[in-house]
Image: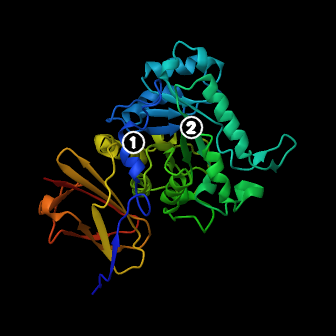
Amino acid sequence: MLRFSVFLFVIFGIHLTTSAQDTAKATTVYDQWTQGITRDPKFFPLAVWLQSPRNAKRYKQAGINLYVGLWNGPTEQQLVDLKRAQMPVVCTQNETGMKSSNADIIVAWMHGDEPDNAQPLKSGGYGPPIDPSVIVKDYQKIRERDSTRPVLLNLGQGVAYDNYIGRGVRRNHPEDYPLYIKGSDIVSFDIYPAVHDKQEVAGKLEFVPRGVDRLRQWSNDEKIVWNCIECSRISNTSVKPTPQQIRSEVWMSLIKGSRGIIYFVHQFEPNFIEASLLDDPELLEAVTRLNRQITELAPVLNSPSLLNVVAIESDLEKPPLDVMCKRYGNSLYVFVANARPEKSVAKLRLLNPSSVSTQAREIENGSEVMIRDSIINLEIAGYGIVSYRIDG
C-alpha cells in the first residue's frame, strides 16, 4: 500500500505554474499594444507555423486562429488573402507590412527563426549562432519603426535540450538564453520529442514543459511565453506523433504557463508536404477537438492563476505532477499533468475545504469525482492529463 509520507505544497511560480506577477497581469497581457493580439478573453492563440494563406479557411475550421510566419513575406497578396479569411498573422517587419492598407491583419512582428542555432555560411558549413546582442538591437529597431505591436522571438530546441548539437560552438551554453529573451515581447521555442532522432530526447515528452518552464524562469516572468508543438512526422519516416502525445504536449505546456500554442505541421520525409496536418484525417480530427476544448476554456485559461489553493501529497520526494488552478465564475478549475512516462499515484488536497463542494467534475468526459475529506485521489497514466471543475 502506498504511504503518503511527503506533503508537498504546490507553490505556483516556483515549482508549477504562475507567480504573483502573473496573477496581477494575466488578463491584460496584450494591453500595451494597440494594434497587437486581441485582448478578448475568449481568444487563446492557436497558431500554425509558416503556412500558405490559401489554406487559412481550412485551418480556421480546425480551430486555428493565428498564422505565424509567411514565406518570403509579407506580400500584399498574402495579406489580402489572410484578411479575406479573417486570419491574423505574426510576420517579419518589411516595407509591405508597414505600408499596406491590409496591415491591420498583422498583430505582431517576428525575428528570423532560431537565431540561437548555428548559422549556415555562404561558403558552406556552419558558423556560430547569432549573438544575443544582435537580436536585442534588431528588437529595438523593430520597435522604433512600430511600437504598437509585440515582437515574437522563436528559439530552437536548445531551450530545453542543453546538449543539442545544432547550437554548434554554443552547445551546452544555456546561459545565452536570458540574453536572447531580452530581444522580445513574446518568446517561443520548439522541440519535438515524439519524432526526435536522439535517444536522450526521443519519446520524452517532458522536454516540452521543461522548455516552457525555463523560458519563464529566464525571463523572470516578464515576457509572454508561447511554444511550438509537433503535428507531423517531420523527417521521421517510421514515427509520427499520436493524438495522445500531441494532447499531452499541449496541456503540459499550458499547465506550465504557456500562453500560446504554435503547431508545426510540415512534413519533409519521405516527401515534402507543407500542410500535412490537413492531409492527415487522424491528427486533424484530434487537433480540431483539442483546439475546440482550449477555445471553450479560453476565458478560464486567460484568467489569473491562483496561489496556494491545492497541495499534492505523495510518497515521492519530488512528485512529477504539475498543477494549475483557475477561478472563473463560481467554479474552481484544477488542471494536473503527469510529466513522466510512468503512472503517478497521489492525492490532491484542497486547502480551503470550507468553500468547496463534495464532488468535482472531470472536464474531459464530464464524469463526477468524489471529494472526501478535501481530497481527490489521483491515478494518472504516463504523460496523462486530468482536469476538474469544482462548483460552488
Q: Which mark is residue 25?
A: 1
- Residues packed near mark 1 inside 10 Å, few (<14), some (14 to 19) or many (20 plus): few
Q: Which mark is residue 344?
A: none
In this rendering, is residue 251 above or below 154?
below
Which residue is under mark 2? 152
- Label whose residue precedes the other's in the sequence (2 or 1): 1
In the rendered image, residue 47, in percent from the top left (x then y), is placed at 47, 38
Disc 2, SS = strand
Name above or below for residue 270 compared with residue 141: below
Q: Quadrant of the N terminus?
A: bottom left
Residue type at mark 1: give it.
Lys
| Residue 187 x/y as whole percent | 55, 44
Can residue 320 be seen at all in this image of the molecule? Answer: yes
Cα distance in 3D space between marks 2 and 1: 19 Å
The foreground one among 37 and 243 is: 37
- Front residue (pair 365, 242): 365
Spot the residue most to the top: 101
Q: Disc 2 residue type?
A: Leu
Foreground mark, 2 or 1, reads 1
